[in-house]
Image (cartoon, rainbow, N blue to C red):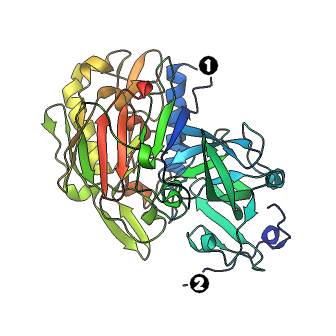
């Protein structure tokens, strides 16, 4: 079906602004709070606020693409001569984009200067009939067919601009990529926390992985509550792989819907959970993906580098909560912060809270989640569970209120390898600070 023309005045004006190699990429990722002199409690509370904003604001077909809760940023350079930029790394979206100089005023603030394509010798617009314009659901022709536009809606708002090609520099590696030069944005304040844009790692044709022609990528996220914050790393292509003697759990990805944006995500066949030695009484169907309307899917389990905390479908959350209440007993204390459910005295989580085990079907194995990956210090008096009920947040509607999302806090100090060629996700415990 032909895409509708985008008849917006700023696209119909004159837009004057304007196959890669197989070697692997290695990118350093910095946690957004790493540059701030804030305490571990402040870092955790910020992430909780981002999680709550997402669950309150995300709804409709665009869900659960996320923005405000994203935590890890890659630094890169764009153009010739190169201009500095920062992008949030997101496995839940496809498009690579950055705000451009023409965006001001009216766009969100960022830490670095806006990218100015007029200063680059390598900036090129993509024509309406260009190959790249037909690659993704995020692109369409402007109303006068003078350019290829990007227009994408997310839970926290929308961005719009024009599609171009440019030279991106990651470390010492130069690659040519199609990207969105964003000239208009309307996002929830604080959504990107000063980053310039997004690097999408989803399954779509415009994602970084797809454009590089690679079939695998991996990342290892350094815990951001440590006093010494070292960079995390993203590996794409030949550089992506697992090392060391730590055990590896490999899980087949669940089948994706073909409807956008659900075709973007990485679904996993989670079938159950154990906490401590107690297997939770959760029907496997609670984690199932189902179609609720034409082109709209609810449920399922996503793994996401962009969400800070894990959100469980209601049946799973209630079963986990009840068992933790039984096991922790008198160790539980009253939460001091609204929105938190279970807490223990500060410093006790590492000794009294049991590990959580995720059981995967489809021939997959088990992934052990240590207490520090689903509990954390939220104030000077308490450690609390930072795992939330998808259905309990104000304003949560389909499909978010029935979707389980495995967030990046649960993924910390775990090297994850996405082998797209074989349809397998592998988990390996690691010291991400040492990579």
Q: Earlier in the sequence, mark 1 or mark 2?
A: 2
Which quadrant would residue 320 be assigned to in this image?
top left
Q: Residue at x 36, y 57 (%)?
A: 420
Compared across the picture, whether 6 is left or right of 289 comes to right
Determine the secondary structure under disc 1. Answer: loop
Q: Label 1 neighbourhood size at 10 Å, few (<14), some (14-19), many (20+)? A: few
Q: Residue at x 75, y 56 (%)?
A: 122
Q: Is residue 251 visible?
A: yes
Compared across the picture, whether 198 is left or right of 365 comes to right
Q: Which residue is mark 1?
A: 37
The label shown at residue 2 is 2
Determine the secondary structure under disc 2. Answer: loop
Q: Contact, CB < 8 Å: mark 1 with mark 2?
A: no
List x then y, in percent, for residue 249: 23, 42
**Is 103 placed above or below 247 here?**
below
Q: Residue lying furthest bottom in this view?
A: 1
| On-image quarter of the C terminus | top left
**Is 51 placed above or below 148 here?**
above
| On-image quarter of the N terminus | bottom right
Q: Is residue 187 visible?
A: no
Q: Label 2 neighbourhood size at 10 Å, few (<14), some (14-19), many (20+)? A: few
Q: Residue at x 38, y 63 (%)?
A: 298
**Is 424 placed above or below 256 here?**
above
Compared across the picture, whether 185 is left or right of 390 comes to right
C-alpha gap between disc 1 and disc 2: 51 Å
Tag nearer the camera, 1 or 2: 2
Out of 24 and 140, give the one closest to the viewer.
24
List x then y, in percent, for residue 323: 21, 35
């Amino acid at each position: 079906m032909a895409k509708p023309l985008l008849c917006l005045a700023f696209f119909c004006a004159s837009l004057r602004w304007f196959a890669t190699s197989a070697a692997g990429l290695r990118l350093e990722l910095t946690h957004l709070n790493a540059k701030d002199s804030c305490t571990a409690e402040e870092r955790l509370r910020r992430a909780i606020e981002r999680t709550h904003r997402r669950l309150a604001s995300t709804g409709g077909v665009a869900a659960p693409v996320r923005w405000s809760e994203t935590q890890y940023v890659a630094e890169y350079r764009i153009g010739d001569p190169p201009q500095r930029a920062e992008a949030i790394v997101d496995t839940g979206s496809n498009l690579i984009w950055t705000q451009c100089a023409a965006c001001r005023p009216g766009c969100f603030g960022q830490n670095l200067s806006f990218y100015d394509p007029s200063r680059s010798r390598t900036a090129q617009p993509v024509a309406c009939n260009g190959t790249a314009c037909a690659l993704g659901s995020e692109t369409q022709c402007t109303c006068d067919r003078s350019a290829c536009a990007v227009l994408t809606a997310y839970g926290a708002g929308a961005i719009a601009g024009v599609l171009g090609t440019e030279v991106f520099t990651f470390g010492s590696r130069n690659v040519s990529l199609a990207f969105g030069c964003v000239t208009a944005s309307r996002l929830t304040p604080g959504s990107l926390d000063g980053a310039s844009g997004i690097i999408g790692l989803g399954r779509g044709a415009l994602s970084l992985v797809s454009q590089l022609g690679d079939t695998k990528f991996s990342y290892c996220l350094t815990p951001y509550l440590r006093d010494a914050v070292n960079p995390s790393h993203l590996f794409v292509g030949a550089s992506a792989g697992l090392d060391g003697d730590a055990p590896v759990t490999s899980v087949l990805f669940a089948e994706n819907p073909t409807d956008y944006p659900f075709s973007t995500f990485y679904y996993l066949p989670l079938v159950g959970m154990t906490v401590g030695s107690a297997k939770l009484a959760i029907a496997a169907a609670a984690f199932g993906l189902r179609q609720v309307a034409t082109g709209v899917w609810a449920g399922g389990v996503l793994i996401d580098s962009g969400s800070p905390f894990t959100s469980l479908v209601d049946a799973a959350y209630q079963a986990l909560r009840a068992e933790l209440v039984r096991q922790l007993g008198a160790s539980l204390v009253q939460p001091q912060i609204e929105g938190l459910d279970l807490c223990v005295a500060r410093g006790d989580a590492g000794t009294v809270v049991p590990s959580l085990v995720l059981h995967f079907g489809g021939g997959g194995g088990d992934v052990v989640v240590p207490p520090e990956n689903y509990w954390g210090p939220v104030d000077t008096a308490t450690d609390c569970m930072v795992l939330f009920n998808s259905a309990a947040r104000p304003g949560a509607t389909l499909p978010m209120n029935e979707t389980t999302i495995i967030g990046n806090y649960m993924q910390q100090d775990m090297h994850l390898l996405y082998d797209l060629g074989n349809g397998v996700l592998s988990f390996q415990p690691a010291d991400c600070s040492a990579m």
